[in-house]
Amino acid sequence: MAKLLAALLLMMVAIGPACAVAPTSRADTVAALDRYRTDFAKIRGYGSLSASDRNYVLFSDAMRRVLTEHVKPFDPQVLVDKAEDGLKKKKAENPRASDRMLTEAALDSMLGSLDPYSSFLDSERYRYLREQTQGEFGGLGIEVTMDEESGLIKVVSPIDGSPAARAGLRSGDLIARIDDVAVKGLNLHDAVARMRGPVGSSVALSIRRPPATDANTRVSLTRAIVKIQPVRYRLEGNVAYIRIATFNQSTSSALDAAVEDMRRQAKGRLTGAVIDLRNNPGGLLEQAVQVADRFLETVDIVSVRGRDPEESRSYRGTSGDLLAGLPVVVLINSGSASASEIVAGALQDHHRALLFGSRSYGKGSVQTISSLSVDTGIRLTTARYYRPSGALVDCFGVSPNLEVKPTHGNTEETHPDPATCDANAPVPPKPQVWMAQDMCPDVMDKAPRPDDDRPLECAVSAIRNRLTGTLAGGE
């Protein structure tokens, strides 16, 4: 997996400071930073770097935060090694690079080496991230990561209603060329920068769709303001279908309005709900908790644990169930990540919902976003989150109660590299499982058609014929 995900929604976001236990002595930190100042001047090729230099202050601030806030401890000398790799590469690429360019390259290299989700946020990425959490931004509407095996960019998920979704891009697609530039050899940041551009301008992507290994399809997309509509809904008979595309600032209130409207449309005779979290890459922690709380009582929803046990936090629900105990089925797949996994895991652990589909992505960590300057910031992995059962989500994901895959399209799954997992983490217990043939035989027995959505059809059938009148997870 990549050292950095450009999918800026693919995270649990907490804005503000994080607290933890300093892993190194002040003397070790000072020694490492002194070495960085000396080596920066040598790589730059002239003069010395003052301890009051604004670029050095920027770097030292970021490194101290890594040492005190990241979920894992790091050796400060190793961090400087990684920073100097970035310095040397930038100097080789651009011998006339400014001190600011060199500093940002050092930060990019150091922070990108920590884990797949930590990163330096230059002015463009910092603005882009804040726009996304507010629900509107310019671009293609695509979450991507680097596929290290091929050296190409891999699609994690297109955002509902975005140019990428309208063009038919799918999870697992590989981007081989951006306009006439080959992706292989570019780093992720440069590739993403090439995909961005003025609203209304066009970009051509050459797509390689597994299992094909060398056949490319060229797709033209027009960049647009991507307005994320977090919740879409409709009635399937008397079953509420609720598609949650992302967890931004308005998701929980949009969910409330959707249920109220469908209850009115059904004249108070709703029989259950399907919550579709497929290809939902995540979003805000508080919104994940609030959405899960809509269907749960005063029970644990998620716990967030950092390096300092005293800084661990648990989130509990409040009384009241938006659907008053009606059966719920949650749809997940390998594009369901982070906030989606908090909701799915909590509802499954408390037997409030059955999960249909395929194993979720497995992104179970919290990133804290904090500013370094007026227009730059850093994103650090400061904690991991655990389901009410105590299961770790990182890499393991959330497994469905009933596995049912689409009858068409790309079914290849995308999950984190196991090397990024905690080797000592206990494997989560397997959930109770059902067979699709038993839960929705009317759906499984018919010949599939190209436009079928078999997971959704199975969920609706199960609610109508198997789950009505009982709690979704009841024995």
Image: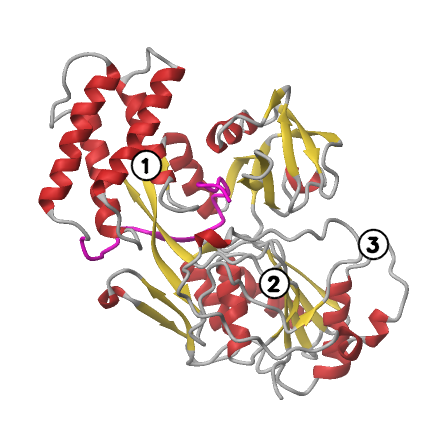
Does residue 328 lie above or below 152 as drawn? below
Q: Look at label 2 and name its amino acid.
A: Arg
- Along the polypeptide, which appears first: circle 2 or circle 1? 1
> Main structural element of the magenta stretch: helix, strand or loop?
loop
Residue shown at the point (64%, 37%) measured from the top left: 174
Q: Secondary structure at mark 1?
A: helix
Residue at image location 61% in from the left, 42% down from the top = 155
Disc number at residue 110? Answer: 1
| Residue linked to disc 2 | 359
Residue 428 image point, x, y percent? 50, 72
Left or right of 160 in this view: 42: left
Magenta region includes residue 10: yes
Residue 156 colored magenta?
no
Rendered location of residue 440, percent (x, y)? 79, 75
Q: Is residue 375 above or below residue 346?
A: above
Q: Is residue 451 above or below residue 57?
A: below
> Mark 1 or mark 3: which is in front?
1
Pick whichever, 87 or 58, lies toward us.
87
Q: Which dot marks residue 451?
A: 3
Could you say which quadrant of the image residue 376 lies in?
top left
- Rendered residue at 26%/39% (across/down): 78
Crowding at mark 1 (Cα within 10 Å: few <14, some 14-19, many 20+): many
State whether residue 373 appears in this view: no
For the residues labelled 2 and 3, the Cα–Cα distance comes to 23 Å
* Magenta span: 1-22
The image quarter containing residue 298 is bottom left
